[in-house]
Image (cartoon, rainbow, N blue to C red):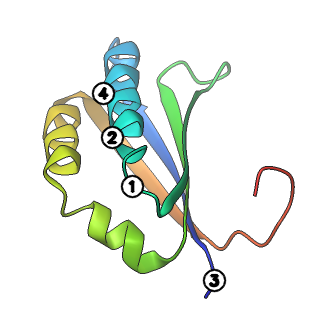
Amino acid sequence: MDRFGMNVKFTAKAGQRDALVQILLGAATAMEAIPECEKYMISVSDSEPDTIWVNEIWNDAGAHKASLDQEATKASIQQAMPLIAGVEAFQIRPVGGKGL
């Protein structure tokens, strides 16, 4: 079965990037308990001060979908929503390379 990935670009409300990063880092810690989550990386943009990228790699799309039903995930989403100005999500299919 093919791996499943997401690249998600979050735009934080002005002045809220660091608070949103902390929530996303908490979500990343929660993902450590899910063996099907191979990668959940948080990055910030040096050229766009309100932008945060989340890069996810999962064993399959079903594992990603199941993670969205977990209480920790729902709590993180609820915490983050007031800090978010916009979201762009891109589904990807990881095929290989270093770190995979």
The quarter holding residue 85 reads: top left
Compared to residue 26, the image places residue 53 above or below, namely below
Residue 18 shown left or right of residue 23 in the figure: right
- Residue at numbered disc 1: 34
| Cα distance between the residues tagged 4 and 3 | 29 Å
Proximity of marks 2 and 3: CB atoms separated by less than 8 Å: no
**Element carrying mark 4:** helix
Residue at figure coordinates x 39%, y 71% from the top left: 63
Judge depth for marks 3 and 1 and give the one in front: 1
**Element carrying mark 2:** helix
Judge depth for marks 4 and 1 and give the one in front: 1
Proximity of marks 1 and 2: CB atoms separated by less than 8 Å: yes
- Residue at numbered disc 3: 2
Q: Earlier in the sequence, mark 4 or mark 1?
A: 4
| Cα distance between the residues tagged 1 and 2 | 8 Å
Proximity of marks 4 and 1: CB atoms separated by less than 8 Å: no
The three-letter amino acid code for the residue at tag 4 is Ile
| Cα distance between the residues tagged 3 and 1 | 18 Å
Give whichever of 43, 99 is nearer the camera: 99
Quadrant of image for the C terminus? bottom right
Residue 90 shown left or right of residue 10 in the figure: right
Q: Where is residue 59 shown, x and y percent of the image?
A: 54, 71
The three-letter amino acid code for the residue at tag 1 is Ile
Q: Earlier in the sequence, mark 3 or mark 1?
A: 3
Proximity of marks 3 and 1: CB atoms separated by less than 8 Å: no
Q: Which mark is residue 30?
A: 2
Proximity of marks 4 and 2: CB atoms separated by less than 8 Å: no
Q: Earlier in the sequence, mark 4 or mark 2?
A: 4
The three-letter amino acid code for the residue at tag 3 is Asp
Q: Where is residue 41 shown, x and y percent of the image?
A: 56, 39
| Cα distance between the residues tagged 4 and 2 | 11 Å
